[in-house]
Image: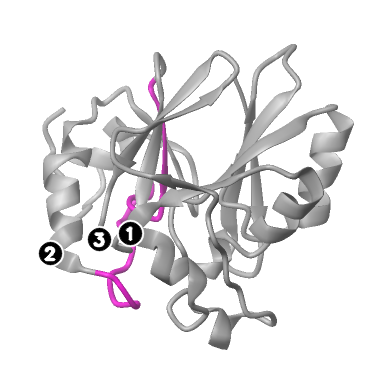
Amino acid sequence: MIIKKMTVGIHEANAYIIHEEGINEALIIDPGDGKKTIVKYLDKNKLQLKGIVLTHYHYDHTSVANGLKKKYNCPIYAHKKELEGLGDPEINQSTTMHSNLISITPDIVLSDGDIINLGNLKLSVIHTPGHTPGGICLKVNDTNVIFTGDTIFSDDLGRTDLAGGSEILLKKTISNKVSQWTDETIIYPGHGETATMQEVRKKDVPFLNKKK
């Protein structure tokens, strides 16, 4: 599996392009900006974009999703509890923080436990509410890799003070789900650096069980 990380936009959000050696299909997770850079990488590597997966509705993770969908005629995936926020520029923060209002209607609506297929890869959907109601993480089956959006970073958790955020739900997510991930799990977060859960556990991250 090849993971191309691109840090895009004024908030330095991470977009990830996933593909396999020798297979010309790719997925992108959270294209928040940098459309030209994304297209350049796809074209250079002769990749067909087969889907756009949004971990949550905030504009810094979604702003070029509609443009990529139009160019590559591929579906947008998002959790069913993100529909309102994706469609409403007030909720997704694009009214005040972005030059263009963003409204997105996903083509494929996800639930916890769903599988997104890409060639030989299977991405399992983990519903991780708290930062937003329908925030998700994506585990690549048969690997230690999990894409975490803004649920958890290498040294902190996603904020809960924006529209749809809930500290109570995030605490449950971290305590009941994220804390179960092994030390060998590698997280690819929506901002900042990649880290193992062993490294994350060494930080003072709220609600995270220190045991592996």
**Residue found at x 56% / y 58%:** 13
Q: Is residue 179 above or below residue 170?
A: above
Residue stretch rendered in magenta on the structure: 144-165
Q: What's the residue type where badge 3 is placed?
A: Gly
- Label pair 2/3, CB-CB below 8 angstroms: no
Q: Is residue 10 left or right of residue 126?
A: right
Cα gap from disc 1 to disc 3, whole angstroms:
12 Å
- Residue on which disc 3 sits: 130
User: The C terminus appears in which quarter of the rendering?
Assistant: top left
Identify the mark nearer the N-term, 1 or 3: 1
Circle 2: element type: helix
Q: Which of the numbered marks, if any, corresponds to residue 168?
A: 2
Q: Residue furthest bottom?
A: 96
Circle 1: element type: helix
Task: Please state the horizontal and vertical placement of residue 152, each as a whole percent of the image.
Answer: 33, 50
Closer to the camera, 198 or 65?
65
Q: What's the residue type where badge 1 is placed?
A: Lys
